[in-house]
Amino acid sequence: MKKRLSLTVKKVLNTVSLLTQENIKANREIIHEIVYLSLPSHARKKYYTAGLEGPYSEDVDLLIQGLLYKKSLRYENGFKAETNGTPDRRERVTVEFLKKHHLLQHDKLAEFSRVFMFFDELKDKKEEELVNYIKKRSKFLGWTDLSRKTKNVILRYLKYARELEKELKGASSGRMGNRDSSG
Amino acid sequence: MHLLEGWEIETLPVRDPIYNFIEIPREFISLIDSEIFQRLRWISQTPLEQLVYPSVAHSRFEHSLGTMYLAMIAAVSLIRNSPARLEAILKEDDAFRSLSPKERERQFILSAGAIGLLHDLGHPPFSHALEEACEYIFEDEKHFYNHEIVSYYYARILLRQKKVKTTPWGEKALSVLKNKKSKEKIKLSPVENLLLTLIDGPIDVDKGDYLLRDSYHCGTTYGLYDRDRLWRNIIITKDNQLGVHPKGAVEAWALRIARYRLGTGVYQHHTRNIIDAMLIDILCGIEKECLPLIIPDYRKKEKFLGWTEHTFLNALMEAGDSRTRRKVERLRKRELYKRGFEINLIEFPELLIKETVTQVKRDLLFWKDSLSSRVKDKIIFLVDRIPIPPVFEKEVQKEIIVEENGNEKPLAEYLGFKLEETQIVSCPWRIFIFVDKDLKDNKEILEGIEKDLREYLEKISKPLS
């Protein structure tokens, strides 16, 4: 295997492990969302599509399956990692950021990750234009709840998206010194 | 009176074994009569299956016409079953907004038809088998053959040639074909998303046609479902997605089962897998500098237009050395390899994702090369997905929505078999090893090869810790 991969078994395992530590029920949807947010932008586009339940990656599903097969994950009211992971900076930064802004609740995380998907793919749009685009378009992607949010709520999510992206960039630039694996 | 008369779409009928008559809109006649489209007559729909099911001889041409017709049937059903929701979707689109409601619907039907008609324009000889082979022979992804990219490339040329590129249906067809591979849904307009799902979704008109057609030509019943019942009962859900009315729910399920049955019984029949592996083996043995003679640059139009299964095999014979020629002869005479063993890649989670599987395909060539000369010329391999029964599919468990009296449920829940989260699975990958006849019965050597391959896979996958 010659390539350096952004999406690995370790990344999924670390995400589940972090969620377990935070006492968050790690269902499939939440794993998809957190892995998505913690990936670099090019990798988000490579592995993920806009699914009915938000950012979705078939590869993440396959990795979960492989981990269950290897018994590195088990399911007990949510997925649980059998061992404590060693999360890299991007994973830690993502979960800490979500925790700090109370975005780790399922419905909030679902909304935020969907807004983030718009933000990540349409960075060239102006803020006002992007808010209108999200409000108008999200209902046609099966994300009706998001389309019903007020402009202020979406603006707040966009502000968080920008902040998280900035923090992740900082985490990546410190990558070499910390021997992270996902940059 | 035919299906499309209410929208002033004038059509020409042609006979077809699946629909009895296919109605072709006048707007599409010049596209069909072009050399780009006529090439599809010489590209088989299921070329390698012919070595398993002798009667299979149909082409991408008839499948494209069938998909066009079924797409228009589906579009009419959406107009009839979900008029308000569809109208809201159509009005969101810049190309449709200024049109009258009736004209919007007409353009929607034509858009669906055009996408169905043009979706397979770029198929190479031996279709998916050749695309798959490219992943083994080329190191760089940019050389992989992707029929969706090529279909878009030639659809654009064709629509421009016939001066219909800027019609609303021409625009929509191009936009959907352009995004069919990347599925950048966020950037597509709502009607483009709907059309994309209609051609490439959990229940789509591509499958809707090829399951029936391939089944018919194979002489099997594996791909049957009640076409009218399903496509007359599709709807747009509250979330503006393609869904089904309860009357069509069982047929949506039947379509997924038909796909599974045809997958296991035809597309992934063990003999078909062996033939795929033989084709890959032949191509892997070609000198790099000769490959452009066999797989030409698709942008060279004259070469592309003459690129059929017949010319492809001839080019292999001309460009290949004596060893390649022997292999091609062997394929032509149907002197097949035998099943050796298979390894499920779920045992190696690090290798499970698409990106690593692509690398594994290349790595297996090195592994094979490292074997003793006694065996390496007697084995071939294939990396393939394992079909899973539809009950476990995400599509059935979550994505296909049934709307009954305003309540929406995933198909599995509606039919009463909703599963736990851990039971919903994706198709993992497996490695098939096929061997020459004389190795088949030598258990000791086969076990040795399997042990060696497992060790190799361990080595190339990273540890879990």
Image (cartoon, helix red, strand yellow):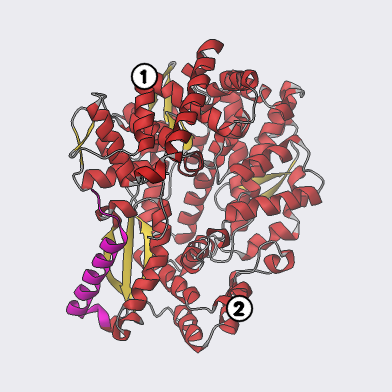
Q: Circle 1: is it few (<14), some (14-19), or many (20+) Cα within 10 Å?
A: few
Q: Secondary structure at mark 2?
A: helix
Q: Point out residue B430 in the picture as x, y percentages from the top left corner.
A: 32, 59
The residue at 46%/34% (across/down) is A170
Examine the structure image and report whether residue A111 is included in the region drawn in magenta: no
For the stretch drawn in magenta, the main secondary structure is helix
Mark seen at residue B315: 2
Q: Amino acid at mark 2?
A: Ala
Q: Residue furthest front?
A: A177
B45 or B328, which is in the foreground?
B328
Q: Position of residue B217 (x, y in %)?
A: 49, 59
Q: Residue at x 49, y 29 (%)?
A: A166
Rendered position, B298 above or below B160: below
Between residue B120 and residue B319, name the one nearer to us: B319
Identify the mark at residue A100; answer none if there is no mark: 1
* Res. B389 visible in picture: no
